[in-house]
């Protein structure tokens, strides 16, 4: 349930969808979202699961605009996990069409809004049409400097960490470095997220309280916000609510 938050009285951003206020000095710079519940949304309506995914795709546009508007710098969306290949072939095929459908339709608006498209995940096994659509959007938006819309596609955190460990090992060998030279920075550099800062806030919809192999390393100090709302029902107001909850939390990074 959404509660009206009336706390912050500083200089504020006034949102269109909700007249409660956000503290513009404390906007999370990187928000990551596990967009869950598309299948259940469709089941509840007697529709095929893909109808839920299509509706879920339509939510993305609004959340990208809102995130950009309030000053979020990076928005990562978990669109397809390495485990999602286990789904029925027809559902996987549809999920692989979604980035293309979204980007074909939204690219002009994303350009107007100065959004930068980025991909986190493995291109291995992705259909050519999906890779082409994403590559086209990445190259069209590479001169922009607004919100980074980072699409996590065919992404799995454990395999990402294993890849990074292998690269660290290779660089030690190549540069003849001692094992003690391994650092967080070194491993971080070899993750698929590379130069992106770690998420400050993780949102997961649909009432599931788990990470599902998503950014296990990068979420070490993130604040988590879980909601029962199914992703196709997620609105800008829910997004605002997540930000307000984030703004009430004291981040101590292990300190006091
Ligand atoms: C999880 O819901 C959702 C997904 C596996 C896919 C999410 C993808 C989108 C919303 C669109 C992606 C498009 C772009 C452009 C990034 P679920 O199917 O697991 O739902 P359930 O748990 O209710 O079955």
Image (tube, rainbow, N blue to C red):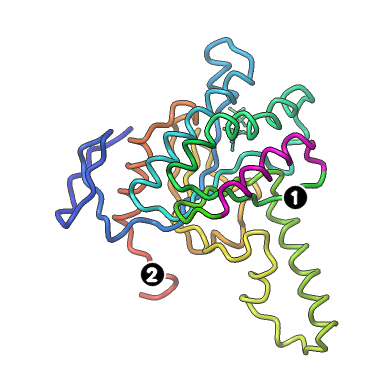
Q: Nearer the viewer, mark 1 or mark 2?
A: 1
Image position of 25 (left or right of 6): right
In which of the image's four quarters is ligand 1 placed? top right
The segment highlighted magenta reads: 125-142
- Classify the position of the C terminus by image quarter: bottom left
Q: Is residue 126 magenta?
A: yes
Question: How far apart are labels 1 and 2 at the CA level?
Answer: 33 Å
Residue 174, percent across and down? 84, 82
Q: Residue at x 45, y 48 (%)?
A: 114
Residue 37, above or below 79: above
Q: Which residue is mark 1?
A: 122
Residue 45, percent across and down? 53, 12
Q: Secondary structure at mark 1?
A: loop
Q: Residue at x 40, y 53 (%)?
A: 72
Q: Which residue is mark 2?
A: 252
Residue 49, percent across and down? 63, 20
Q: Is residue 199 magenta?
A: no
Q: Secondary structure at mark 2?
A: loop
């Amino acid at each position: 349930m959404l509660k009206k938050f009336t706390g912050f009285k500083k200089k504020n951003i006034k949102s269109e969808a909700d007249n409660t206020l956000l503290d513009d000095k404390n906007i999370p710079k990187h928000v990551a979202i596990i967009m869950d519940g598309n299948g259940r949304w469709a089941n509840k309506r007697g529709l095929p699961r893909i109808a839920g995914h299509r509706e879920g795709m339509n939510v993305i546009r609004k959340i990208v605009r809102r995130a950009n508007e309030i000053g979020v710098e990076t928005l990562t969306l978990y669109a397809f996990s390495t485990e999602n290949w286990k789904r029925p072939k027809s559902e996987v095929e549809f999920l692989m069409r979604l980035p293309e459908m979204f980007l074909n339709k939204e690219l002009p608006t994303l350009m107007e809004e100065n959004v930068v498209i980025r991909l986190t995940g493995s291109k291995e096994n992705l259909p050519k049409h999906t890779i082409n659509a994403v590559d086209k959007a990445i190259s069209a938006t590479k001169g922009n400097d607004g919100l980074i819309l980072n699409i996590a596609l065919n992404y799995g955190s454990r395999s990402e960490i294993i890849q990074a460990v292998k690269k660290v090992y290779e660089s030690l060998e190549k540069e003849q470095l001692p094992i003690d030279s391994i650092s967080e920075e070194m491993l971080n550099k070899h993750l698929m997220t590379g130069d992106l800062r770690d998420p400050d806030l993780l949102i997961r919809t649909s009432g599931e309280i788990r990470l599902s192999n998503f950014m296990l390393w990068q979420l070490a100090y993130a604040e988590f916000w879980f909601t029962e709302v199914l992703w196709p029902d997620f609105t800008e107001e829910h997004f605002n609510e997540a930000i307000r909850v984030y703004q009430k939390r004291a981040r101590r990074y292990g300190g006091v």
